[in-house]
Image (cartoon, helix red, strand yellow):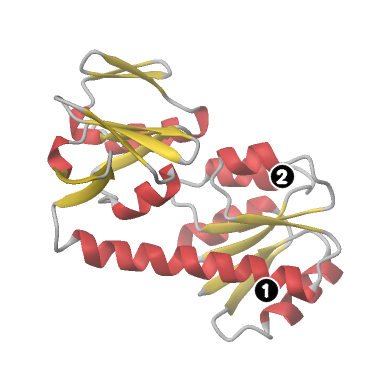
Amino acid sequence: MNCLIVDDDKLFRTAIKHLIEKVNFLNLKGECSDAVEAFNYLKNEPIDLIFLDVEMPGMNGLDLIRQLEKRPITILITAKQNYAIEAFELNVADYIIKPITLPRFMTVVSRAKELYDSKSQRVAIDNKTDYIFVRSNSVLTKIYLRDIVYIQALGDYVNIFTPEKRYAVHITLRKMEEKLMANKFYRLHRSYLVAVDHIDTVEDNTAFVGKHRLPIGEQYKKQLLSRLNLV
């Protein structure tokens, strides 16, 4: 995995580099001392994983994530523990509290590798199938992807809505997202996935999908508009 370190502390960047050298699936491509430098770097270089400091002068790490249209897998680095909610909303893979220990580092990069591998596998699966089987009420049911209108998160369950029926399935929204075609489904909100083809209108922070009104999270709005083939 090609990775990038973004931190304004040179000593800390050096410490992260030493940890990266111990992991054979990580390949350090560069380091940046602030978020603006990282933003420009990411525009031109393919990066799979960023180690991103939250608290930096000027634009902080969370602001950087919000500005990126294509977001690499991100591990936040912070001296505080009060960024968990924002990290969740931005789909950050994990975060590390300073000072970093080797066991904690190995845990978070192993999780990042699992996410990276699952994304690669998902593309191969999507090229072969246009349906999924779900277990609902002890019955395995085939659902064609073209029939899925949207998916709602409910803790460890999701509701899958088709025009005719709702299916309650024991799976997280993140896992569900990994199984679906990336170019057909979009994370509209931390609690909703929507089939782009079923969106009828968008007004402010609301998407209208048939008779349903779905909220649009502010951090997802810009990328959604880029997917709607605007003229």
Local crowd at mark 1 within 10 Å, few (<14), some, or many (≥20)? some
Residue occupying the point 39% across, 64% down: 118
Numbered marks: total? 2
At which x and y percent is residue 142?
14, 47
Please name the amino acid that badge 1 sits on.
Met
- As helix, strand or loop, the secondary structure at mark 2 comes to loop
Q: Position of residue 24 (x, y in %)?
A: 58, 86
Of residues 83 and 151, which is closer to you in this image?
151
Residue at screen point 61% across, 69% down: 109
Q: Is residue 62 left or right of residue 197?
A: right
The image quadrant where one finds the C terminus is top left
Q: Which residue is mark 2?
A: 60
- The correct choice, above or below, for 206 with respect to 91 in the image is above
Q: Position of residue 42 (x, y in %)?
A: 52, 59
> Disc 1 versus disc 2: distance between alpha carbons?
25 Å
Front residue of 209 and 204: 209
Q: Residue 121: x percent and y percent?
A: 32, 68
Q: Residue tagged by mark 1? A: 106
